[in-house]
Image (cartoon, rainbow, N blue to C red):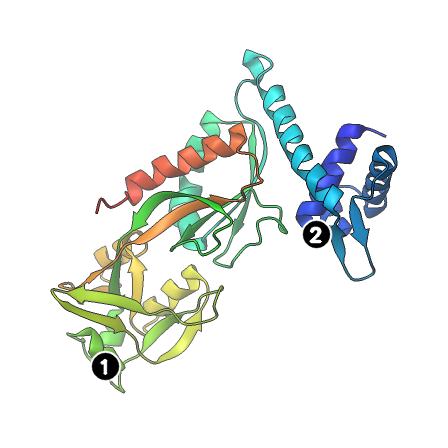
């Protein structure tokens, strides 16, 4: 038994919550994965996992051992990257998950510069607006807009997205241009709904002007949970939408979207990079987070309050 392979297999099973998922992430068979963990238990003479036909759980001994294994594997990874000047640059596979519009419009176009700096980092990028189970999906970090509700995660604020309301000219020609956010509740008006993947509810946006505050709401004919589809619905004239400036700027310049309620303000949407507390901040993860922070500082700097 290779002790390193066995420890890596055990850690991945704990993180993935199943032998099948763990085997997929390590590109090995479920049988081999099971044998490695069984051999590790035999060597340690303790039961690390509780297995039933329906559920896989970690024993008390297994949970304690897992914490040691994670630190040991991370230390070994860091040691390998610092052996010589030739291998000093961070390397290895990094699994990240980012919102689809941010990936398409900001992150992916900037990646050539990142890979010029760190050619040995392999990025596996999930692109979606869904809530990701960082442990179960074996993701190293996520980039998300809005406050982080999961207090168990470590989060670093990397930017603030400025928001504004807008609509397509075809929509405004059809129903008229609203001058006050409350007019969106009138029967002729529609919004494009953005549905939170966490709560399932359509988001509302609080707009302020002087001492007045309005939670902008309205009826919708379409609600989506993906930023790219949300933008497409607005461009198609399906209703009023609220967009980060980076998503609307080019469309406003071309006259494809018209800004609304320009004398009203919305609180900026904070952007965070988040990762599990038991996920060692390896060199490759550290440089990726720093690069994202630098990139967001150019496109959506943190607002000083």
Relative horizontal placement of residue 171, taking residue 149 as reference (left or right): left
* Residue in the picture at 82% in, 58% down: 52
Q: Is residue 26 visible?
A: no
Q: Is residue 141 visible?
A: yes
Q: Earlier in the sequence, mark 1 or mark 2?
A: 2
Q: Is residue 255 above or below residue 192?
A: above
Q: Quadrant of residue 300?
A: top left
The residue carrying mark 1 is 175
The tag on residue 17 is: 2
Q: Position of residue 269 (x, y in %)?
A: 32, 54
Q: Position of residue 66 (x, y in %)?
A: 69, 39
* Residue in the picture at 86% in, 41% down: 38
Q: Position of residue 249 (x, y in %)?
A: 26, 54
Q: Quadrant of residue 65?
A: top right
Q: Is residue 71 above or below residue 100?
A: above
Q: Nearer the viewer, residue 156 or 203?
A: 156
The secondary structure type at the circle numbered 1 is helix
Relative horizontal placement of residue 152, taking residue 172 as reference (left or right): right
Q: Residue furthest front?
A: 60
Numbered circles on residues, count: 2
Q: CA distance from mark 1 to mark 2?
A: 52 Å
Q: Around disc 2, counting alpha carbons within 10 Å, would you say few (fewer than 14), some (14 to 19), or many (20 or more)?
A: some
Q: Residue furthest bottom?
A: 187
* Residue in the picture at 76% in, 59% down: 55
Q: Nearer the viewer, residue 172 or 219?
A: 219
């Amino acid at each position: 038994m290779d002790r390193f392979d066995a420890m890596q297999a055990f850690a991945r099973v704990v993180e993935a919550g199943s032998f099948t998922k763990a085997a997929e992430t390590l590109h090995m068979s479920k049988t081999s994965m099971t044998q490695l963990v069984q051999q590790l238990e035999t060597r340690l003479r303790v039961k690390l996992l509780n297995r039933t036909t329906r559920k896989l759980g970690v024993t008390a001994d297994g949970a304690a051992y897992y914490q040691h294994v994670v630190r040991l594997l991370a230390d070994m990874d860091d040691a390998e990257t610092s052996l010589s000047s030739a291998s000093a640059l961070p390397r290895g596979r990094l699994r990240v998950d980012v919102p689809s519009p941010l990936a398409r419009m900001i992150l992916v176009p900037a990646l050539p510069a990142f890979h010029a700096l760190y050619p040995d980092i392999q990025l596996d990028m999930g692109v979606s607006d869904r809530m990701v189970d960082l442990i179960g999906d074996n993701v190293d970090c996520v980039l998300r807009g809005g406050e982080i509700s999961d207090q168990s995660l470590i989060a670093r604020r990397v930017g603030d997205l400025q928001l504004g309301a807008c609509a397509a000219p075809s929509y405004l020609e059809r129903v008229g241009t609203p001058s006050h956010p409350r007019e969106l509740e009138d029967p002729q008006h529609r919004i494009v709904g953005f549905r939170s993947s966490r709560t399932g509810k359509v988001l509302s946006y609080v707009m302020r002007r002087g001492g007045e505050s309005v939670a902008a709401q309205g009826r919708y004919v379409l609600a989506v949970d993906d930023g790219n589809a949300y933008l497409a619905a607005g461009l198609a004239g399906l209703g009023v939408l609220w967009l980060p400036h980076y998503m609307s700027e080019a469309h406003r310049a071309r006259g494809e979207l018209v800004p609304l309620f320009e004398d009203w303000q919305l609180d900026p949407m904070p952007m965070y990079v988040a990762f599990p507390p038991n996920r060692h901040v390896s060199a490759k993860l550290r440089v990726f987070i720093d690069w994202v922070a630098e990139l967001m500082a150019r496109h959506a700097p943190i607002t000083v309050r």
